[in-house]
Amino acid sequence: MSCHLTEADVRRLLDPAQLCAALESAFRDRYPSISLPPRTHVELAHGIFLAMSCYDRDAGTLGMKLVLVRDHAQAHARDSLTKGRVQATYMLLDPETAQASLTIAANYFTDLRTAATSAVATKFLARSDVSTLGIFGTGRLARTHIAVLPLVRNFERVLVCGRDPSRSAEFVEELSGELPSLIITAVDARTCAAQSDVLCTCTSHPAPLFEGRDLRPGTHLNLVGAFRAQTREVDTHTIQRSRVVVDTYAAALSEVGELLIPMQEGAITREHVVADLHELVSRKKQGRRSPEEVTVFKSVGCALEDLVAAELLDEIS
């Protein structure tokens, strides 16, 4: 009989620190042996539908996530019903029968696994002496990144830059109450880019959020918002000056505007991507090489991350 976990169940059961550890272990040890087909994209009248599956033969686990990303106009019009632009459901399946053994309301699930993956990358790429976390965005992904990244670095303050100053102020007030140990401040784009040691772009904005020349040496960036070939959250200069790591090569070289647009311009080549997350955490490839180097982790989401999170929930529930 299939079990179903609600959003409230996931929030109660899925521990961020445990998830970070499980993801690091999975990308280090399990990634070479899993089956990870390309993500399916279906353009809809009001957005895009995504299907992401992963099978681990050794563990005997199979799962699939279904995601609907609404266009902005639709998302705003239906916000009271959908509670956000991105809506997701996860199914943990019996590999013998394809019957669902566990279904999961996967909005917070997706937000948390994304932030936890950023935290793993930050652990391996950011300087050890960072103190300021910068966040572009004021939505669900921004919230989970602010909550999870302090698990891997000792941040003292958080700079938040949102599209709407009033929403940014409201967001900062909410988070300051929830995370009193952090000094959280709303700032403009240039300040956020120039003063952050670790910078996370958690938006649906289709064009660069800041100028790459504003980044100071030694910054680490987690780029998690854009997932189409024609959209990007950072400019060509940012990518050119950075050592770039991706979650998976296949997705990065087919879906990532941050990379594909500079390649089309002739500004970088395929060799500019130096490692995937498996190579980074297994130390097959070198991450940061100096305190002054700018590093980038570009993520479009990997189905292994979802499978790992679902396995943890299955064990607990």
Image (cartoon, rainbow, N blue to C red):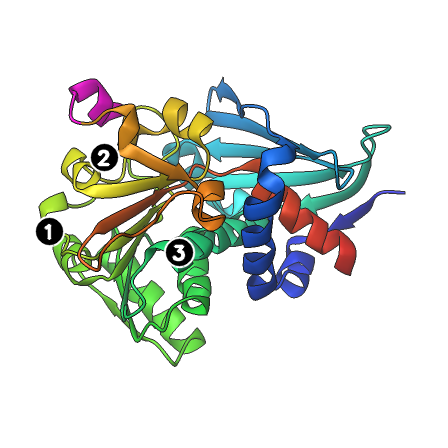
Residue drawn 86% across the image and 29% down it: 96
Q: SS class of the residue under badge 2?
A: loop
Tell me if mark 2 has few (under 14), some (14-19) or many (20+) residues whose alpha carbon lies within 10 angstroms of its own: some
Question: What's drawn in magenta, residue-wise?
Answer: 260-267
Residue 161 lies in the magenta-colored region: no
Q: Quadrant of the C terminus?
A: bottom right
Amino acid type, label 3: Phe
Locate residue 1 relative to residue 44 in the image: left or right.
right
Nearest the viewer among 139 and 60 is 60
| Residue identifier under label 2 | 207
| Residue identifier under label 3 | 124
Q: Position of residue 189 (x, y in %)?
A: 17, 53
Residue 264 lies in the magenta-colored region: yes
Q: Position of residue 175 (x, y in %)?
A: 39, 70
Q: Name which of mark 3 and mark 2 comes first in the sequence.
A: 3
Tell me if mark 3 has few (under 14), some (14-19) or many (20+) residues whose alpha carbon lies within 10 angstroms of its own: some
Q: Name which of mark 1 and mark 3 comes first in the sequence.
A: 3
Question: Where is residue 145, by image quadrant?
Answer: bottom left
Q: SS class of the residue under badge 3?
A: helix
Tell me the CA gap for discs 3 and 2: 28 Å
| Residue identifier under label 1 | 214
Locate residue 237 relative to residue 144 in the image: left or right.
left
Numbered-mark total: 3
Tell me if mark 1 has few (under 14), some (14-19) or many (20+) residues whose alpha carbon lies within 10 angstroms of its own: some
Residue drawn 29% across the image and 39% down it: 205
Amino acid type, label 1: Asp
Nearest the viewer among 191 and 119 is 119
Q: Are marks 3 and 2 in contact (CB under 8 Å)?
A: no
Q: SS class of the residue under badge 1?
A: helix
Amino acid type, label 2: Ala
